[in-house]
Amino acid sequence: MFVQVKKHKKFLMVILIRALSDPFSSEVIGESMKAVAKVLKELKEKDIGSSFRDLTQQIRTYFDNEDDALRLLSFVLFGILARLTKRKWKGYFAEQVRQSWVTLLLHLQDPNPRVSVECRATFHLCVPFLGLKRFQTAVNQYLDGTAELKPEELQMDICRHLVKVKMNYATILLVSRKAQPARGPAARQKRGGLHSAVAGEGLLV
């Protein structure tokens, strides 16, 4: 299988990425995501080529999807890309992480436990792309091992840390949350908590 995948990698990726945007069937999208995951596990970063950009952007569109299965698979795929990213696409993927990390942070409290667990693993893989070693250490205290995850405390600590060392990231946090719809009272409460945490550290005037 490995030889066949590498031989036809460009063709496979183009077809599968197209299927990810199927407007009529969530089942087709889900099966395509599973297929992409299998293909990616047989490839290296250099094998993906220019499809890397399209694939990353397409995956991110499902982070907030109402279908639990699609949300879960989108986090799985994003985590696989994080593992694959080495040199060529490191700068691009880092930017995608900066644009996505607030959503990832919020889905640590996803109402579906399986999605929450997968998001936790993906968030952990993506933290290094932020380029903040001290921040990564703080996050590891929450995400390493089997200790109970307390996302609200993590959110607050992240906000305080970013305001101190990288104010531009805290600004991205606020802009990103304002740009995304808050679905339901719980989502609005979480977004408000992030806003309050940053405001409490003196970032907002």
Image: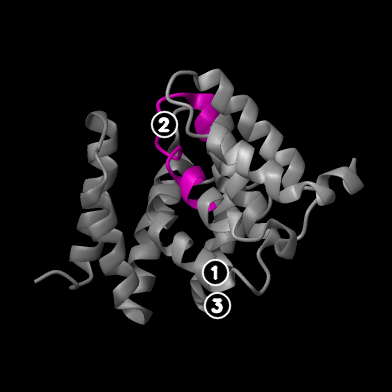
Amino acid type of the residue tagged 3 in the rendering: Lys
**Which residue is pictured at 48% across the width and 44% down the height?**
58
Give the labeled residue for mark 2: 65
* Circle 1/circle 3 CB separation < 8 Å: no
**Which residue is pictured at 23% across the width and 70% down the height?**
201
**Which residue is pictured at 62% across the width and 37% down the height?**
16
Q: CA distance from mark 2 to mark 1?
A: 24 Å
* Circle 2/circle 1 CB separation < 8 Å: no
Question: In the rendering, at what x and y percent does residue 120 appear?
Answer: 56, 47
Residue 128 colored magenta? no
Amino acid type of the residue tagged 2 in the rendering: Asn
Mark 2 residue element: loop
Please name which of the two marks, 1 or 3, marks the residue nearer to the observer: 1
Mark 1 residue element: helix
Mark 3 residue element: helix
Decide if residue 1 is on the left or right side of residue 199: right
Give the labeled residue for mark 3: 133
Dot label at residue 129: 1
Q: Give the quadrant of residue 127.
A: bottom right
- Name above or below for residue 72 compared with residue 95: above
- Name above or below for residue 91 compared with residue 181: below
Q: Which residues are magenta?
A: 56-71
Callout 3 crowding tier (Cα within 10 Å): few <14, some 14–19, many ≥20: few
Return the residue found at the far left.
205
Decide if residue 59 is on the left or right side of residue 37: left
Q: Give the quadrant of residue 35.
A: top right
The answer to which of 137 and 18 lies nearer the viewer is 18
Residue 65 colored magenta? yes
Quarter of the image for the N terminus: give it: top right
Question: In the rendering, at what x and y percent does residue 38 appear?
Answer: 76, 39
